[in-house]
Amino acid sequence: MSQKDRILEGAEELFFKAGIRSVTMDEIARHLGMSKKTVYQYYKDKDDIVKALVSKKLDEDKCEMRNIAATSSNVLEEMINMMKCSEEFFSRVNPILIHDLQKYYPEAWQLFQAFKADVVISSMYDILKRGIEQGYVRPEIDAKVLSRMRVWQVELGFDTTIFPVNEFNTWKVQLQMLEHFIYGICTPKGHKIINQYKNIIEQE
């Protein structure tokens, strides 16, 4: 692993635990056992690290979404697999990280917002349209509206003013929202498939 990648990995570990704003360049260097001068050789400041991390994470997500779409047998399995894939992220991330990103790192947040608009919403729209064709999603839904609603719903689950971390588990909030969404869009045929998946997940 290159020094540049090591710095990103170390910064990610600290950001996930404590949020972004509270972590200093000194702490990143100390965590990695290297001098601050070495960190500055690769990244001009913390903003630069945050942007690089967000960009890397979004590229990984794009590849993961393609892989899941290619290996899932239907759109319901695809949505569930995408959520299961996110479990590790949700279990590690401090919800304050999302708040910090939005409030204090506008360039990095804009990367995330652009990805959400250009990739995630269009991907969800495609899933819903394919779901209608497969007979699992109700044909009368407005896929354009619900694809946007679903993507914003995920972000809502990270809002600590609505779901305080001392009261709510982030992963459980996301699961509840996903389940509510899927049952709302499904046909009776879709409900049967969802119930089968739920039984499998609960037995794991």
Image (cartoon, rainbow, N blue to C red):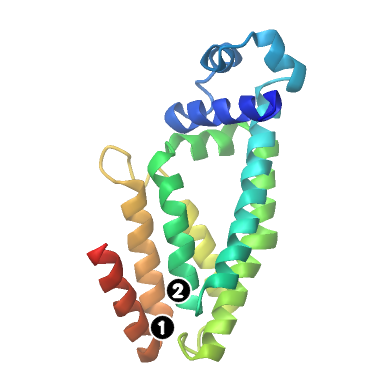
Q: Is residue 142 visible?
A: no
In percent of width and height, residue 138 lies at: 46, 88
| Quadrant of the frame with the N terminus | top right
Relative to 116, 85 lies left or right = left
Q: Of the residues shown, which amino acid type is indicated by label 2?
A: Glu
Q: Amino acid at mark 1?
A: Cys
Write the residue at 35% across / 70% down: 180
User: What x and y, as percent, mark residue 185?
Assistant: 43, 80
Q: Nearer the viewer, residue 135 or 181?
A: 135
Q: CA distance from mark 1 to mark 2?
A: 13 Å
**Residue beneath disc 1:** 186
Residue holding disc 2: 77
* Left-right relation of 93 to 71: left
Q: Compared to 195, does 53 lie above or below? A: above
Residue 201 visible, this orientation? yes
Q: Residue 144: where, in percent of width, then height?
A: 60, 75
Q: Earlier in the sequence, mark 1 or mark 2?
A: 2
Q: Quadrant of residue 122?
A: bottom right
Q: Residue at x 49, y 62 (%)?
A: 82
Which quadrant holds the C terminus? bottom left
Q: Quadrant of residue 49?
A: top right
- Pair 1/2: label in front: 2
